[in-house]
Amino acid sequence: MLRNIQNIYPSEDFNVYLQVTDKEGQLCSKTNLDKYNDEQLFINSIQKCRTATGTESLEKIAELSNVLDPNIKRNCLLDASSLKLCRDSVKIPLDVLNILSTGESWYNKLGFRSDSYEEEITKNATFISKLFSDALDEAHKAESTHRLYEEMYDFILKNKKDEEKERDIWLLKDKCNNEIYSVIQEVTQESRANIVQNLTVQQVFIKVKAFLQGGSKTCTPKFVYNASIVGYLLHIFQEYVFYDWALCKELVNVNNENESPSKKRKTKMGGSKKQTNKRRKQKRLKQRRTRRRLLKKTN
């Protein structure tokens, strides 16, 4: 069936999508029917709708893949998942939140993984086991986080209009970190001393995740402010998260079951596991830019 669609709508001339909505017109999923190759189907968008959760939509797309073409071996996607709160006034990078609180992303838990998944798990486990205060100090010292801190500081000034703007980047970062600690204290209901001396990154973000899930029902100005600060913090810590946002999941079907294990391990757009560190870094930077463009489009 898929080959017939591609014959009618050649991929060099057309973009063909299968878009599924609920009866109210809310998007459930959007799938690109122009495959990168004969072995995978690319999922453009997944979200919870009235008649299906995200997990259920992914399961349905897996079933659909076998109907469209029995030769499809995997479903692939680019993880640009976000949590939109309070009528979209707050946007949280859900992949980073889940990695910091559980060690892997939501898609990872559902079997969507990259070639570097095992390495990601190991490196992220090391980061989230650090003391939160040590991780924040590391972010404070890094020049790569200057822009992210400046964006956070601009947001803080909008909410504290009586404060004079700080020009020195390091003093600016000091003020942002003080505000972060104040918000984390309120969110976690822990003393600053306990946060600094005892709590790991993971322990903090487990509490942060519970706060975001519980407080979003009220959406008070205080909640929106605290959640926004958390959002900026997640973007800062994203610099230290090891994650390839291009993910694939092997489909379970007759054709796949007959493959050798070594062939099944060849995932994600024909990529090789023996990539150099330089190539991986370039690839991650390219995917991060693509992911940011996707997030901007959904604003």
Image (cartoon, helix red, strand yellow):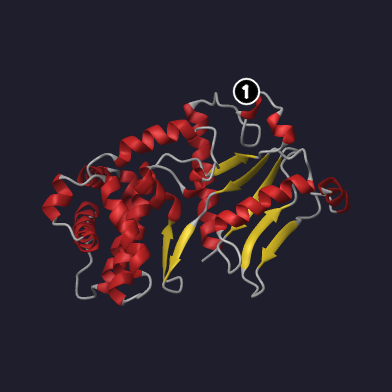
Which residue occupies 60% across, 47% down?
Answer: 77
Mark 1 residue element: helix
Is 290 above or below relative to 296?
A: above
Q: Nearer the viewer, residue 22 or 170?
A: 22
Which residue occupies 73% across, 45% down?
Answer: 35
Q: Position of residue 153 (x, y in %)?
A: 28, 62
Q: Where is residue 282 in the image (x, y as percent from the top left)?
A: 51, 36
Q: In this view, does 16 lie to the left or right of 232?
A: right
Q: In which quarter of the image is residue 200?
A: top left
Q: Which of 139 and 107 is in front in this view?
A: 107
Is 141 above or below relative to 278?
A: below
Q: Where is residue 114 in the image (x, y as percent from the top left)?
A: 54, 37
Which residue occupies 51% across, 58% down?
Answer: 295
User: Would residue 228 be seen by someone viewing this image from the given angle?
Assistant: no
The amino acid sitting under disc 1 is Ser
Which residue occupies 17% across, 57% down?
Answer: 190
Q: What residue is shown with label 1?
A: 262
Q: Position of residue 13 (x, y in %)?
A: 81, 53
Label 1 CA crowd tier, 10 Å (few <14, some 14–19, many 20+): few
Q: Which residue lies furthest to the left in this view?
A: 193
